[in-house]
Amino acid sequence: MKPLTAYAFRDLNFSPDGDTHVCVVERGALSKFMRVKELSKTFSGAVFYRRGLFTCYVGVWGRRNGKRLRRFLQERGATVMIERAKPDRARLALWSTQKARANLRQLPPKTAS
């Protein structure tokens, strides 16, 4: 299986000092391991970056959330390769937050579609 690239970088958009860590993966690659709705529920929010019309990245912000996302993807069978840079020409498109976070261990395993 092809390795999944996780982009880990800092972004100015989430805090005044610009020190917020963000971890995103390409949406199409993520869908093999978890749904976007499941990601948003598990991490009490999600962040979306776009590059052009057809390329979308989805992920989380916060150092610990980024580590949890990568670990969760590995537990579901992904080989995660970390790229310590923002995806080329990607721009923040949307982010969402929720008040409550689901327990990661209580989520059902991803079934093959």
Image (spheres, grey):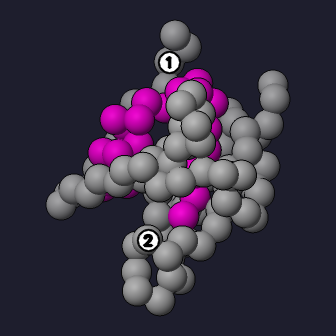
Q: Is residue 53 left or right of residue 9?
A: left
The residue carrying pointer 1 sits among few (fewer than 14), some (14 to 19) or many (20 or more) residues within 10 Å by Cα, namely few
- Residue 73 position, x and y percent, is 60, 42
Camera-near label (2 vs 1) is 2
- Tag 1: amino acid: Thr
Residue placed at 40% from the left, 73% from the top?
Answer: 14
- Residue 6 position, x and y percent, is 68, 50
Question: What is the tally of numbered marks visible in this picture?
Answer: 2
Residue that carries the numbered disc 1 in the rendered image: 111
Q: Which residues are magenta?
A: 22-46
Q: Farthest residue in the bottom direction?
A: 17
Q: Is residue 97 left or right of residue 88?
A: left
Q: CA distance from mark 2 to mark 1?
A: 34 Å
Residue 28 in magenta?
yes
**Element carrying mark 2:** helix
Residue that carries the numbered disc 2 in the rendered image: 13
Q: In the image, is residue 49 above or below residue 1?
A: below
Residue placed at 78% from the left, 49% from the top?
Answer: 81
